[in-house]
Amino acid sequence: MAGRPFARVHRSRPGPRLPWAFLVLAGLVAGLLLAACTTLSPATSAPQGTPTLGPSPAATPSPQPTVVASPPSPLTSSTSLTLTLWWPDALLPPGGSEAQEVLESQFKAFEEAHPSISVVLQVKAAEGKGGLLDLLQKAYPVAPSILPDLVVLNAEDLGEAVRAGVLQPLAPLLPQALLDDLYPFALNVGRFPQGVMALQFAADVEHLAYDSGKVPTPPVTWTDVLSSTARYVFPAGGRQGRVNDAFLIQYLALGGRLVDENGQPALDGKLLARVLDFYAQGVERNVIRPNVLEIETLDQCWERLAAGGPGMANVAASRYLRERTKYPALRFAPLPTWNGAVTTMSRGWVFALVAQDRPHQEAAALLIAWLLDPPRLAAWNTSAGYLPTRREAMTYLEDGTSYIPFLHWQLESAQYHPTAASYEAVAQALQSAVREVLSGTATPEESAQRVLKALGLPAP
C-alpha cells in the first residue's frame, strides 16, 4: 500500500485543464436541476437553525453546553471505501505550492495508515456561481449522490450551508481531546441548534501594528488613540457593501450583540452611537482621516503602514507573521478598544460533514482528526499562511519571540464571524452609518437611529 501514488486531485476549472469527469458531472447536475424545476422537490425541508454570536470577552460569558464526543469505531480492514473531499481553489492554487506539497504528503500518509480508505480531492471555486456553496445548495435537492463526503467552506458560508440542510452533525464523531483543544471560536462558529456542524481549522485575526518611531507606547483604549499625534488607519470602506470587521470588533468589545438567539437583529443603538462617536472624534482630532473609507482590506492598511504613512493600523496576523522581519520598527499590540478589553475576530476555513451514511461519516472523522493532529495542523497552516486553531498546534510555531504567545492570547479572545441569515441586512446598515459619520453627513446619534429604523428595531 505504501507505493500507492497520490494522484486524485481534480480541479473544477474552465478551459483545457478541466477533467472530463467534471464535464460529465456538470452536465448531469444541469440536467437534473432543469428537471427539478418541473418534477422534483427537495427530499427534506431545510432546517432553519442559526447560531448566536458568542459573548464578547468584555462581557460576562454565558456557559456553553459541553460537546460529548464518541470517537468513530475503527473501520475494518475488509471495508474499502472512497472518501470524496471538496477543497477550495483559494487554498490550493494551480501551479504547485508548499501548501499543496504539505497537503499531498499528509493525505498520502493518511492512506498508508488507513489502507481501506482512498481519498479523492476535488478542487472547486471558493465562492460565486459554481463555487462550493453554490454547488452544495443546487445539487442537494436534486442530485445528492454527487455531493462530497466532506467539504471545506469559508466560515462565512457555513450558515447558508446549514440552513440548506446539506450538512450533518460533526462533533459527536471526533475525539473529545481534539474538541477540548480547539480555541473557543473554532468550535463555536459551528454551533447550531442541530449540533456542532463544522470545525474551523485555519484562521486569521486582526490586531494593531504600530511604528515604534512614531508611537512609543501602543494605545490600549480609545482615549489613548485620540490623545496620540500619530494617524490611525483601519478598513472602513466595507466588503461588498458590508461593514468591516474593524467596526464589529469595537461594538462587540462594548458587550453589544448583533443577532439574538433566533438569528434576528439585536443591535444596541447606544453602543452603536458610542463606536460611531469614536470615529467622529478621531476625524475631528485628525487622528482618523475620512479617507479610511477608501480602505477595504487589511492588506491595504499594511501597505500604508509599511510605506511610512500612518503611525498605527489594523493588520492581519498572517501578513505580520510573514513580513515582520522586513520592518524592524513595527511592533504589535491588541486592538485599542473603549476600555481596553481584548477582542478580535476570526476569519478562515472550516471542515463540514456532508456524508449521511455511517461508514463514510466515520472515515471523514478519521481524516479530520488526522489533519487536525497538532504537528500536521501547524505544518499545513504555516505553509498556507494561516493560523492553526488548536492550542497545542500553536506551540509548534514557537520561534523564541513574544509574537507567537501574543497570537495565542488573541486566538483565545477571538469572536467568530456572524453566520445568521439576517447578518447581511445588519452589515449593510452598519456600513451606511460608518460612511455617513466618517464623511460628516450625519452625527453618530442620527446614524445609529437610522440603522435601527432600517432593521425595524425600536429606538432606545
Image (cartoon, rainbow, N blue to C red):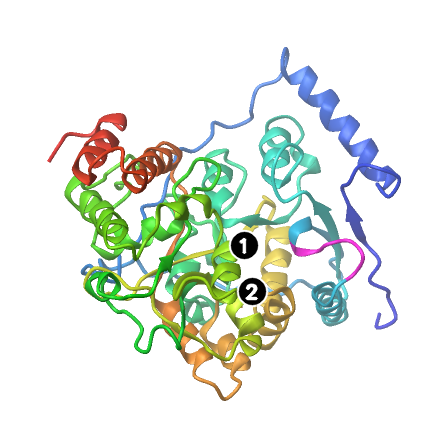
* x then y, percent, for residue 112: 77, 70
Determine whether 273 is above or below 317 in the image: above
Can residue 406 be seen in the rendering of this structure? yes
Q: Which residue is mark 1?
A: 349
Is 177 left or right of 23, judged from the image as shown?
Answer: left
The three-letter code of the residue at mark 2 reads Tyr
The x, y position of residue 37, in whole percent, is: 63, 14
| Position of residue 186 in the picture relative to residue 351 (left or right) | left
Q: Nearer the viewer, residue 119 or 90?
A: 90
Which labelled disc corresponds to residue 386? 2
Quadrant of the image containing the C terminus: top left
Of 136 and 452, the residue lying toward us? 452
Q: Position of residue 445 (x, y in %)?
A: 16, 37
Magenta residues, start to end: 91-96
User: Residue placed at 21% from the left, 59% from the top?
Assistant: 338
- Helix, strand or loop at disc 1? strand
* Secondary structure beneath label 2: loop
Mark 2 vs mark 1, foreground winner is 2
**Nearer to us in this view, 49 or 155:** 155
Q: Residues within 10 Å of mark 1 (few under 14, many from 20)?
A: many
Up/down of 370 relative to 282, above or below: below
Residue 114 appears in which quarter of the rendering? bottom right
| Residue 336 falls left or right of residue 184 | left
Q: Earlier in the sequence, mark 2 or mark 1?
A: 1
Query: What predominant SS class does the magenta segment belong to?
Result: loop
Residue at screen point 52% across, 64% down: 307
Q: Residue 140 magenta-drawn?
A: no
